[in-house]
């Protein structure tokens, strides 16, 4: 090769290398600039504290196609007690050139100490990142939410604020209605909603179902009439409000309205009404025979219809508007979170403090023995009087049979598994309930009926359950914000086999992916169900790790230290861990300190993935029963195969 060409080739190679590097950097920078991202947290960038809150992310791609993953990371806990943990929600983001996409995830935000981190990544390249500060955005739940696409929503908010009502408002762009939640629990921190009826037909299918389900589960939806009253013939409005409007009419007198709002209208004011009738509705305010405000029960919630246009300038300029809204919002009470979410710990603690009966079995035997005595008398009267020897024979045989039967019954009572069920119905303004099923034990006595009651007005219910709990325990868990909430208990024990590097499987609407890395155990749980997973507790490597809430359709990921040294937990260690975890839930520590060690000792299997690893999960039943399934195989029970234990069938309740 010509020596003169070597420097030229070297220079050309370096030039091509730097051009490729510059092109890559320019492409990455250009991709970032060509991606227009807007985030909306909660409703109008306000949210209810300690509630499930929607986070809406709108992405417009003006550049080349992007195939990436969208992440939202929420940090909870406090650094002072070393309880900080992260929940990462992930979604696939396929963005063709020119695409506009709306992504939404519903987060559970407990503290505003740490920002929410948003990032869009393609493999290891970060295409977009943003930190959303939470300070000053949270307000105490419940909030009153105004949803309007007209400019008067701002004035509506100011009217509500004048009376000190704790509320926020959700801007509703007509072109992008995706800022409202697509899951009903996205309205978790909302007590009442005032909505422009024109918006409801524009909602997506998921948004409408979320709003309707929220009402059915105890929400209160308020709307008002319009000059264009024909819109109320839409199927959605008919289904929600049950309104039949026959036309318009001018309000003949404003006397009742002025009295309701404690203020007069200007002279000559004309107010046009929708002439409305509500199916199974109640008239809350009327001028003569003309309804002004109607309401009706919808499931466990309520809908309210105001017959005139509450966005009209005549009404908005009225000095009585704040008082009007205050009274209208108070027509139906707002469910408090304390009432809506039963404190199961209190319920169970009340059950455990019931009195004991030393010999309750005899209550069952007495009618049994009395029946035999009656039978002896009847048979004795049938035997001929002259046959004295036969009569003595029959009486002797029946006496021996009675004694044998009574003795057998006493033995059977001590060896029979008993079960009891109780349904706790909450106050009439609430829809929550807990069903406690199948507290059973072997060689046990049956307790006296015990009243179950908590601090939130629960009606007393008698519950009977055994003294000892050695088999087939079904321990109820706390209902969280809705009938179809799941409760997760996931446990891993001795995950140390050198032959097992990773495990992936699906169970009860969850997809697990557990793998061992150099840093420890990499745990991923994806919630494939339509409901959030709350109050999770992970038992791994002989210790407990509380799991954060996992929203529907999202993925939780956490790295766990893979320290498998040491022996199994001692009884005292389990007491300490039980006290630490359940005291954080506000429960009775004394009760759970004795309960949790029993639970861990009794749980042997629901799935045995290999000889060194055991996993168990909580289950939800659609008939309202929520429990942990536990079996006690015995000291010498052989290892179970994968999925050997039969799974509960949705809708079934076992009776023993």
Image: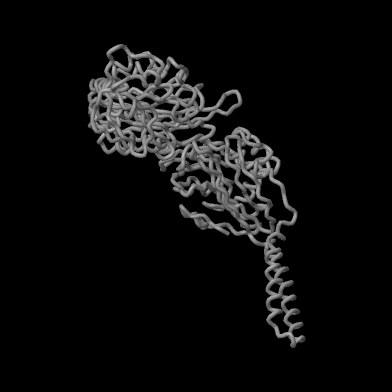
How many numbered markers are drawn? 0
Q: Position of residue 624 (x, y in %)?
A: 49, 47
Q: Is residue 202 above or below residue 475?
A: above
Q: Identify the residue at image location x=63%, y=41%.
A: 565
Toward which corner of the image does residue 527 lie, by quadrant?
A: top left
Q: Position of residue 584 (x, y in %)?
A: 61, 32
Whether residue 612 appears in this view of the structure is no
The quadrant of the rendering that contains the C terminus is bottom right
In terms of depth relative to the viewer, which is nearer, 234 or 331?
331
Q: Identify the residue at image location x=64%, y=39%.
A: 578
Whether residue 160 appears in this view of the structure is yes
In the displayed structure, does residue 640 sit left or right of residue 181?
right
In terms of depth relative to the viewer, which is nearer, 28 or 387?
387
Q: Residue furthest front?
A: 288
Q: Residue furthest bottom?
A: 386
Q: Position of residue 405 (x, y in %)?
A: 70, 71
Toward which corner of the image does residue 44 lie, by quadrant?
A: top left
Q: Is residue 648 above or below residue 570?
A: below
The quadrant of the rendering that contains the N terminus is top left
Q: Position of residue 364 (x, y in %)?
A: 68, 61
In the displayed structure, does residue 148 sit left or right of residue 404?
left
Q: Is residue 123 above or below residue 479?
A: above
In terms of depth relative to the viewer, which is nearer, 153 or 254?
254
């Amino acid at each position: 090769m010509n020596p003169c060409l070597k420097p030229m080739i070297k220079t050309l190679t370096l030039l091509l290398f730097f051009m490729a590097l510059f092109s890559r950097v320019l492409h990455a920078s250009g991709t970032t600039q060509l991606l227009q991202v807007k985030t909306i947290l909660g409703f109008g960038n306000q949210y209810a504290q300690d509630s499930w809150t929607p986070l809406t992310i709108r992405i417009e791609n003006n550049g080349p196609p992007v195939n990436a993953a969208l992440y939202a990371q929420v940090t909870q806990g406090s650094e002072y007690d070393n309880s900080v943990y992260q929940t990462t929600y992930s979604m696939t983001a396929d963005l063709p050139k020119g695409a506009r996409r709306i992504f939404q995830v519903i987060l559970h935000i407990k503290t505003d100490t740490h920002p929410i981190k948003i990032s869009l990544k393609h493999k290891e390249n970060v295409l977009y990142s943003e930190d959303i500060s939470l300070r000053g955005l949270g307000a105490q739940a419940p909030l009153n939410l105004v949803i309007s696409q007209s400019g008067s929503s701002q004035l509506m908010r100011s009217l509500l604020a004048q009376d000190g009502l704790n509320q926020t408002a959700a801007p509703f762009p007509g072109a992008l209605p995706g800022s409202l939640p697509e899951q009903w629990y996205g309205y978790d921190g909302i007590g009442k909603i005032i909505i422009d009826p024109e918006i409801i037909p524009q909602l997506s299918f998921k948004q409408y179902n979320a709003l309707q389900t929220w009402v059915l589960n105890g929400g209160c939806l308020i709307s008002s009439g319009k000059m264009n009253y024909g819109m109320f013939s839409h199927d959605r409005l008919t289904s929600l409000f049950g309104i039949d409007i026959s036309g318009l009419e001018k309000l003949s007198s404003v006397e009742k309205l002025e009295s309701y709002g404690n203020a007069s209208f200007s002279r000559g004011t004309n107010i046009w009404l929708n002439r409305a009738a509500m199916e199974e509705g109640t008239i809350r305010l009327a001028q003569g025979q003309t309804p002004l405000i109607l309401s009706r029960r919808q499931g466990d919630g309520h809908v309210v219809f105001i017959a005139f246009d509450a966005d009209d300038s005549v009404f908005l300029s009225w000095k009585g508007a704040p008082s009007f809204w205050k009274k209208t919002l108070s027509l139906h009470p707002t469910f408090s979170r304390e009432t809506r979410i039963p404190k199961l710990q209190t319920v169970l603690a009340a059950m455990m403090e019931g009195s004991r009966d030393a010999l309750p079995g005899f209550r069952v035997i007495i009618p049994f023995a009395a029946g035999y005595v009656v039978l002896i008398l009847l048979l004795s009267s049938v035997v001929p009087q002259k046959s004295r020897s036969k009569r003595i024979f029959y009486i002797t045989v029946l006496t021996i049979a009675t004694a044998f039967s009574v003795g057998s019954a006493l033995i059977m009572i001590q060896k029979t598994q008993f079960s009891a069920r109780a349904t706790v119905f909450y106050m009439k303004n609430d829809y929550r309930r807990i069903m406690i099923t199948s507290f059973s034990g072997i060689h046990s006595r049956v307790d006296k009926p015990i009243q179950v009651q908590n601090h939130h007005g629960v009606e007393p219910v008698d519950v009977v359950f055994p003294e000892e709990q050695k088999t087939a325990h079904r321990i109820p868990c706390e209902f969280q914000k809705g009938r179809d909430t799941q409760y997760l208990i996931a446990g891993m024990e001795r995950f140390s086999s050198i032959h097992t590097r990773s495990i992936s499987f699906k169970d009860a609407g969850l997809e697990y992916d557990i793998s061992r890395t150099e840093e420890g155990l990499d745990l991923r749980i994806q919630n494939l169900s339509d409901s959030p997973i709350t109050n999770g507790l992970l038992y791994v490597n002989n210790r407990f790790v509380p799991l954060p809430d996992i929203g529907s359709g999202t993925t939780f990921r956490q790295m766990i230290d893979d320290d498998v040294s040491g022996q199994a937990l001692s009884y005292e260690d389990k007491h300490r861990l039980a006290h630490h975890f359940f005291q954080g839930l506000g429960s009775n520590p004394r009760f759970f300190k004795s309960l949790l060690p029993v639970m861990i000792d009794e749980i042997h299997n629901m799935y045995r993935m290999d000889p060194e690893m055991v996993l168990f999960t909580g289950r939800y039943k659609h008939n309202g029963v929520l429990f942990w399934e536990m079996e006690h195989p015995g000291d010498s029970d052989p290892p179970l195969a994968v999925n050997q234990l039969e799974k509960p069938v949705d809708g079934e309740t076992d009776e023993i």
